[in-house]
Image: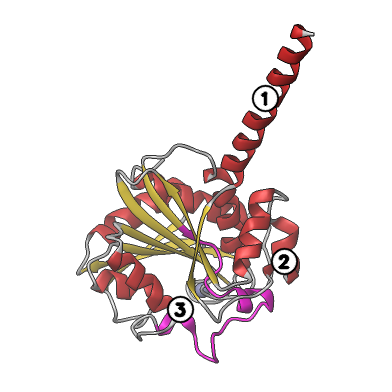
Amino acid sequence: MKNSWLKIMTLLFSAVLLFSTLQVASAIKTEIIYTGTGGDVSKNYYIKKYTPRTQVTSEVFQAARKGTPMFTFGNGGGKKVIIVAGVHGNELPASIAAVKLINYLSGRNIRGTVYVVPFLIPSSTAKTYRYWKGKNPNSIANIRGTPTNRILQIALSRDVDAVGDFHSTRPGGVPGKTSILCTRIPTYESYRMAYQMSRYSGSAFIPAQVAGKDYPGALEDVCNLAGIPAVTAEVRSPHGSVASGSVTKSYTQMIGFLKYNGVI
Ligand SMILES: [Zn+2]
C-alpha cells in the first residue's frame, strides 16, 4: 500500500514536471507592435509549404492574425538586435527564413537580445501583395505612423544596436542578386557589418556612400541616419515565389548578422 502511494506521487510529480517543461518550451515572448496589419499568412501557399510544422510556427501564425508580431529572445544582456522580414509581402524567402530562425532561437541560450519580426505586414504576405495602402513600405520609413517607421521607433526606444532588414530581389531587378547593402555615412558600422555578413554568407557586397540618397525612406537608410547601424540583405528569387536555395541563403545571412553582433 505504501509503495503504490509512492508510485502515484512520483507519477504525479513527473507529470507536473513534464507539463511545466512543455509550457516553457512553447512560450515565446510575443508582442503585437502594429495593428491593422493582421492577416492569415498560412493562406500563402509558399509560407505554409516551407515553414517548419511545429507548435512554435503555429504560435507565430496565430500572432500574425492580430497585427505585426514581434518575438523576443535572450537574457537582456549583451547586444540588442532586430531582424525584420516581410516589408514587401511578395518577398517570401526571408519571411520563411525568419520563421525558421524563430524555431531555432526558441528555448536556446543566447548572448544578448534578438527581436524578430517575420511578417511586417501579415495581411500583405497573406495575399502576396507588395504594397501597404498602395505605397512601397520601404520608401516611407521616414514617415511617422507607417509600419516601417514603427521599426525605427522600436529600435530607438529599446536602444537596439543593429537592424537587419531581409528581402528578396527578382532576377533582372535592382539589385537583382544575392547581396548585402549598406552605407558608409553617417553610420560606418553599417559598412563593417555588411562586409562581414557578405563574407559569411557568400553574398555580394554593395556599399553606398551616404544614407538616404539612393533609397530615401528605406528602413535601412532611416536607421543609419538615426545612428543605428543597419543593413539590407537580399536573396535572388522571383516575386511571389521561392527560388531553390533562397530560404537557406536568407537564413545564412541572418545567422551571419547574429554572429557578427556576438549574439550567437
Ligand atoms: Zn524588398
Q: Is residue 236 above or below residue 112?
A: below
In this picture, residue 225 sits left or right of residue 142: left
Dot 2 or dot 3: first in sequence order is 2
Q: Give how far across and how far down residue 93 sits, in percent.
A: 61, 62
Q: Residue furthest front?
A: 1
Q: What secondary structure is marked by label 3? A: helix
User: From where the camera sits, is residue 220 visible?
Assistant: no
Q: Give how far across and how far down residue 69 sits, in percent.
A: 53, 66
Q: Quadrant of residue 83?
A: bottom left
Residue at point 33% right, 72% down? Answer: 153
Magenta span: 116-140
Dot 2 or dot 1: first in sequence order is 1
Comparing 253 with 25, the one in front is 25
Circle 3 residue: 147
Which part of the image, by quadrant, shows the C terminus?
top left
Name which residue type carries label 3.
Pro
Q: Quadrant of residue 4?
A: top right
Name which residue type carries label 2.
Ser
Q: Give how far across and how far down residue 184 sits, in percent.
A: 24, 66
Q: How is the image coloured?
A: secondary structure
Label at residue 14: 1
Name which residue type carries label 1.
Ser
Residue 21 is covered by the magenta coloring: no
Circle 2 residue: 42
Residue 132 is covered by the magenta coloring: yes
